Amino acid sequence: MTEVTLIQAVNQALKVAMAKDPDVILLGEDIGVNGGVFRATDGLYKEFGEKRVLDTPLSENGIVGMAIGMALQGLKPVAEIQFMDFIYPAFDQIVSEAAKFRYRSGGEFPAHIVLRTPYGGGIKGGLYHSQSTEQLFTSTPGIKVVIPSTPADAKGLLLSAIFDEDPVLFMEPKRIYRTATGEVPAGDVRIPFGKARIAKEGSDVSVFAYGSMVPQTLQAANVVEKMGIHAEVVDLRTLVPLDVDAIVASVEKTGRAVIVHEAPKFSGFGAELSATISERCLYSLKAPVLRITGYDTPFPYALENLYLPSVDRIARGIERTATSA
Amino acid sequence: MSEVGDPSKETMLRGFRLMVLGRAADERGTNLQRQGRIGFYVPMNGQEAAQVGCGLALDAQDWILPAYRELGVALARGIPLKTLFDQFFGNSADLLKGRQMPCHYGYRDYRYITASSPIGTQIVLATGIAAASLYKGEKVVSVPFFGDGATSSSDFHAGMNFAGVYKAPVIFFLQNNGWAISLPREKQTRSPTLAEKAEAYGFPGVQVDGNDFAAVYKAVSQARARAVAGEGPTLIEALTFRMGPHSTSDDPTRYRKSEVVASWREKDPIDRLQSELIAKGWLDEAGAEKIHEEAKLEVQSAIDAAEKSPPPDPSTLFDDVFKEPTSLLEEQRREFLEMVSQGVLRP
Ligand SMILES: Cc1ncc(C[n+]2csc(CCOP(=O)(O)OP(=O)(O)O)c2C)c(N)n1
Ligand SMILES: [Mg+2]
């Protein structure tokens, strides 16, 4: 096995799936000749041709609507939304069509699609190239939401997404596209949905994170480790379906919980996690659940580094939660 | 014989100066990004005549709704270079308070609406502004600027359709620069021209040579006269070419041939206007050279001034979410400033 970056792992998963199944079709803006603005589809146009890698006109509702239509006809389309910030023109197709097709047709017409999209801050992208709005989709029944944080997870989870018969929103942490590196298994090795990953074991406090906040949180855990605090870092991997058992097991073990995400705090996914913990583990808790998140403002440009949960901010939160009586 | 909408000698010379100034500022914008002094830049190189020609044909009271590539329009509107470079640096003097990526700006004093990034949204907003102008009885037009790619957006359809229905005074100013990032114009739509799309919405669409300053000026002047006379909107497709990358994040060699770019270099709008002015006897080589030199100095002094300002104050992060911050936001601001003062949060 060789080391690859997260974006190379995405590319590999697409390549493996396309080689295996001729029904896998890619579509999106600039994904063909250009290989995607982040190069996620680099080389695939050349290898699989223009019938399987479609450079679309500039229309996200067009892309998602096309993908759903293709799925109804038996294909397995994987659409790229160039930035998550540009997914909103397609919101109607995602929420009204993809997420409800199976239910409204009594299971007759599932929308077997994957929407891949780079999300999140840390690249000096300002308001419209930085947002994480997973909560808009996790609160929509009928669509799965997957967010990898390592190359191996990116590959294994994307392969699962492509062959999963439900619509999947696959959010890619663009900030760590090239900094997250690691070995990935060759071929079609899938990672099942709904299984969290213990990124670091610990006994004093549980820290839940996903996507680009996982490396930040691991660094913070190393900072507090030097103070003698053993934090357990749980990478949720898939928000829908959520691995409730892993969350409960960890909190029952440590009695303390911290949640980290980039998205704003108010009504963020952390609220769901916090509610889950209080509903299921209240009597194990020795301290209030803490959320470390983006602030409740639009995503800034110049002050981005102050906005995003930093290693120091996360470490401080973990320390306070671990030491509060 | 001059016709309705032909630019005067004064306008032609003014246009030339602005185009040269725009080119100089634009080249520095890209360089500043390459040097890591600003975070991002969107060059307009090649589109100067379309932008300045349109900008100068408008009245100061007309509303402008730019995308991210409209430096020439901003300069034609009279927005000072220093103001623009403050925005590119995202510093404390930036009137937008460092909130947006470079090239996404706007200023109420200039009736120049703050740009966003999502493609196409400003097109229907322009129709809304025009509807309000109609309602108020103001004889002004609104002008959304957008590209060939944006014609595939739903908001293009909505904006065009509504403008047709309400006979709104809008000039839909479409710069067909051949590309939407890597997608060539031919793959954006099967329609032979973009201008003809207007027909389906019930108003005229015209194609104009976007590298011909005078032609653009004239087409916009005529569309403006029509709009303020209550005759409704016009779509103008200015045919031009994006000489540079889509943005500083883009590598155009991946998707287009250098010969195509070279063929458009022959049609450079600044060279072309310069030759025209010289042929008319309105400018000589020495005069042109002086304009080019002055432009570079002007840009340099704007950059020097802008680079002096520090980043925005951290506490401004929480301003302007609402008119008054909610109590939860105030609480977040307090905790945040405490962490800044303790050094937990560092810029
Ligand atoms: C809704 C939306 N989708 C995708 C993007 C990413 N994007 C930015 S510019 C661009 C191409 C725009 O092309 P065009 O409208 O021709 O304008 P030009 O850049 O050529 O001036 C794309 C796809 C975006 N900003 N907004
Ligand atoms: Mg274009």
Image (tube, rainbow, N blue to C red):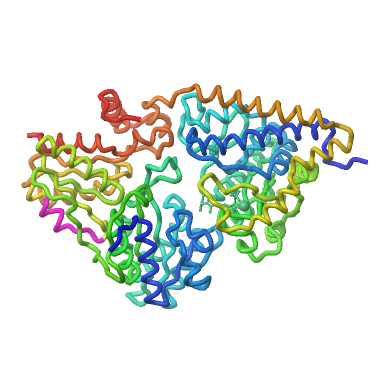
- Name the residue nearer the viewer: A261 or B178: B178
Q: Residue at x 41, y 66 (%)?
A: A78
Q: Is B166 contained in the magenta span?
A: no
Give the answer, above or below, for where B292 lies relative to A79: above
Q: Main secondary structure of the magenta part?
A: helix
Whether residue A128 sits left or right of residue B13 in the image: it is left
What quarter of the picture does the C terminus of chain B occupy? Answer: top left
What quarter of the picture does the N terminus of chain B occupy? Answer: top right
Give the answer, above or below, for where B300 lies relative to A98: above
- Name the residue nearer the viewer: B184 or A90: B184
Q: Residue at x 7, y 50 (%)?
A: A253
- Name the residue nearer the viewer: B275 or B286: B286
Q: Which residues are magenta?
A: A241-250
Residue A294 location in percent, x, y? Answer: 32, 40
Whether residue B27 sits left or right of residue A130 in the image: it is right
Give the answer, above or below, for where B294 lies relative to A26: above
Q: Dividing the picture into quarters, in which one does residue B255 lie?
A: bottom right
Residue B215 location in percent, x, y? Answer: 80, 45
Residue B5 location in percent, x, y? Answer: 82, 41
